[in-house]
Image: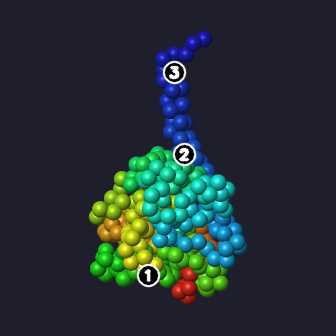
Amino acid sequence: MGFTLVELLVVLTIVALLTALLLPAVQSAREAARRAQCGNNLKQLTLGMHHYHDQIGAFPFGFSTLEQSWHAMLLPYIEQEALYRTLIFQESGPGNWDSGSANTKACQTVIPVFRCPSLPLPEHVDHDIPQRVPNSYNGIASSSAASDDLSTVPAGYPRVALEQIDLDGMLYGNSAIRMADVTDGTSHTVLFGEMHTNPDFQKDGQSMDYWQIGLPHTATWLPGGIGGTEYSEALASTLVPVNGWKDSTLPGMVMELGCGSYHPGGAMFGFVDGSVRFLSETVDHQLYRSLGSRNGQETTWP
């Protein structure tokens, strides 16, 4: 016996209702899997940092006078030594990041551990360097930095910028922080934070753009902590609340220094002890700020 039209409509309605009920669960499961992979990426990065420290005796710099970011120095410790060996450590000629040299190709190479699977961007974006690869994870430079350089720190914010040396975080210009320097405790100090990477999202002329390996705009930086800009392409500050990009009242130069993500409600962080935690965007701000300092003796994470 065949179905009547009414029966068929009833069946279709039930199927539609079941689909509507199941779809959020499927999407939630997929996001949970992506978040787990994001956490695994950060775990690999923190362990790579530990191997680097074991070999060298200190963590790598956040960026250098030759415009490399910490991503470049970590390559041999995340199974990318062959790529590391192609890098040209000079500023002129083939050392330029947009010259089409091996340095350019390194910035164009997709390295999965630097990318959160929830990042909805293409693998390559033309931005200062052709076909540049976006990055999802920045090093934590400071608990107080409010801009890339002192000349653009907004009124009312701490006079601290990413261009300065001797910041209180783990990675900054020409830094070489040792485990022994982390007097707040390795489980209470953040090494990496996830970023809400989106070069098309701008505020006050500042893009939320974060990149791997090469930082061309830092070219004129001097070890004394002056010159250059756009250190926020690889570094972050816990002065800015988690997912500060949502706060339209923040100045753009402050906003771009903040960690965030495409995960609902917070972002993933890698700690100096190698642990990885998801921090809510509602976490107490002063407590969160304290995690960005290695030696501030502030209130510690419970």
The label on residue 8 is: 3
Q: Of the two numbered discs 1 and 3 on the same chain, state the one appearing first in sequence.
A: 3
Return the residue at label 2.
Answer: 27
Q: Residue at x 37, y 74 (%)?
A: 227
Q: Earlier in the sequence, mark 2 or mark 1?
A: 2
Helix, strand, or loop for circle 3? helix
Q: Where is residue 8 in the image (x, y as percent from the top left)?
A: 51, 21
The residue singled out by tag 1 in the image is: 224
Any mark on residue 282, and which?
Answer: none
Disc 3 marks a residue whose amino acid type is Leu
> Which residue type carries mark 2?
Gln
What's the amino acid at mark 1? Gly
Q: With respect to residue 253, does 164 lie above or below?
A: below
The residue closer to the viewer here, 280 or 70, is 70
Q: Position of residue 155 (x, y in %)?
A: 29, 80
Q: Nearer the viewer, mark 2 or mark 1?
A: 1
Residue at (41% x, 73% y) in the render: 221
In the picture as drawn, the residue positioned furthest to the bottom comes out as: 297
Any part of residue 41 in sight = no
Q: Which label sits in the foreground, 2 or 3? A: 2
Spatial distance from mark 2 to mark 3, Cα to Cα?
Answer: 28 Å
Instruction: Give the alpha-carbon distance from disc 2 to disc 1, as whole Å.
Output: 49 Å
Looking at the rendered structure, the secondary structure element under dot 1 is: loop
Near mark 3 (Cα within 10 A), the count class, few <14, some 14-19 or many ≥20, is: few
Q: Which residue is drawn at 61% across and 82% down?
A: 182
Can you say whether 231 is above or below 35 in the image?
below
Q: Tell me how many marks there are.
A: 3
Is disc 2 surrounded by few (<14), some (14 to 19) or many (20+) residues within 10 Å? few
Left or right of 77, for residue 120: left
- Residue situated in front as seen by the camera: 41 or 166: 166
Report how far apart the C-alphas of labels 1 and 3 lie in the structure: 76 Å
